Image (spheres, rainbow, N blue to C red):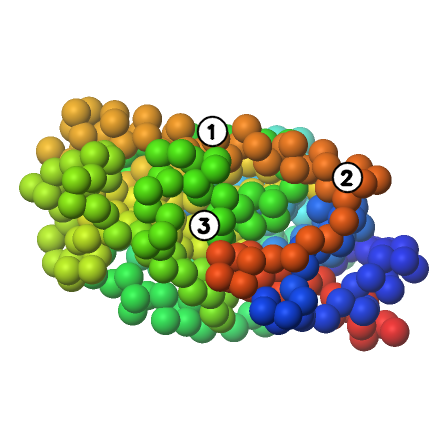
Amino acid sequence: MPVQVNPSDSQQDMLGSWQRRSLQHEAVSLPAEVYYSPEIYRLEQEQVFGKYWYYVGHVSQLEGAGSYFTVDIAEQPLVILKNKADELRAFYNICTHRAGPVVVGSGTCNRLTCLYHAWSFDLEGNLRGIPDMEAAEDFDIAAHALTSVQVDIWESFIFVNLDPHCEPLLTQLGELPELFKRYRLKDWKRAHSIDYWTDTNWKLYVENNTESYHEPSVHPILAKYYQSIEAEARHHYYLQYTPFFGNDDLPTNLNPDLYQAGLNDREMAGVSTMSFFPNFAWITSPTCAIIYLVDPQGPKRTRVRWDWLVPDTEAATSAANLDPLIEFFDNIQKEDLDLLPAVQTRIQSMGYKQGRLSPTREVGTHLFQELIMNAIASPARSEH
Ligand code: FES
Ligand SMILES: [Fe+2]
């Protein structure tokens, strides 16, 4: 990585002395600066988004050979595309001349042509068009190919890994593909998408999404489910299951005729929340799924992309089915986003103290904090 990370001495001490603590005995929230320090954010870009498979988008954003879309999750500009043989490729969207963007937005193309001085690259990243460079001696054209990035798909979800020596996506996913295989989410249709923005560190959003503790107070409509929630956290993920009630009136349970075929009794009788480290999550029900992409855009700014998926039937994709689902989940999201910036402000204040975590309700938050701290503390430890 070209940019040097220089945590301060006190940050080095904080990272070097961090220890996992058990939830029952002494686990507390993380030190304040983890949520606003530019140096910690840079460590996360390198040690989390630079090492782990992370989610970039849904396969429906690509349609055939030459289609592409761009993302800059954790401020790393990438282009994801289908080559001429309709195979998935990913590259840094950084021209090898003087760092211009080789493409913007999304669409279809035969070549990627830099917006700055018009160098152009084929869909394998090779440099092909080079205006006014005939006089350049010893110009190694092959060495000026775009930098490629590992890319893979789980169901209909595209993940990348910036580390050329990374383990396979399937290894990082663990048992998730097996646990959720009956939903057959790759057959579902992306029916609606929204980008939400919040003045919040990305980890506060993920922590909030990996616990049920806040649900009765922040989401009164969900309060009646609180006592029946089941939760567990292991490996790189958090799992939460909320059974429906017989007299349920939520739109997730409106019409059994719309249920995805092939689900087991438990899957048909409730909603599953899953959060996969670092930036992917979903809520799945028998009739719809909300897919989360959490995108850090600085130490105190986060984009959250939500895609609504439904079984690909006329009834499920109809406005009559979709509109209540969208409104319901959009309200839940806004309740969280109304609160989280107030938490961010207080963490940054001089009055913040680290507080005890709930042994039963914050198992996912505890695991997420452990994964984050292990990822960013490693280099600090090795330098000590
Ligand atoms: S920066 Fe791309 S052609 Fe100059
Ligand atoms: Fe919430």
From the viewer's perspective, is 355 left or right of 225? Answer: right
Give the label, 1 or 3, closer to the camera: 3
Name the residue rendered at 46%, 65% in the picture. 233
* Distance from mark 1 CB to nearest ligand 2 atom below 8 Å: no
Q: CA distance from mark 1 to mark 3?
A: 16 Å
Q: Label 2 belongs to which residue?
A: 348
Q: Is residue 35 above or below residue 218?
A: below
**Dot 3: within a 10 Å radius of its alpha carbon, few (fewer than 14), some, or many (20 or more) residues?**
many
Residue located beneath label 3 in the image: 212
Image coordinates for residue 54, horizontal then vertical, percent = 51, 55
- Residue 300 at x, y = what percent? 69, 37
Q: Is residue 381 above or below residue 308?
A: below
Residue 21 location, quadrant? bottom right
- Name the kind of residue labelled 3 in the image: Ser
Three-letter residue code for mark 2? Gln
Q: Residue at x 49, y 49 (%)?
A: 213
Mark 3 residue element: loop
- Tell me the mark number nearer the camera, choosing from 2 and 3: 3
- SS for dot 2: helix
Q: Is residue 376 above or below residue 198?
A: below
Residue at 52% from the left image edge and 51% from the top image edge: 279
Where is residue 153 shown, x and y percent of the image?
38, 58
Instruction: Identify the image quadrant of the N terminus.
Output: bottom right
Tell me which label, 1 or 3, sits earlier in the chain. 3
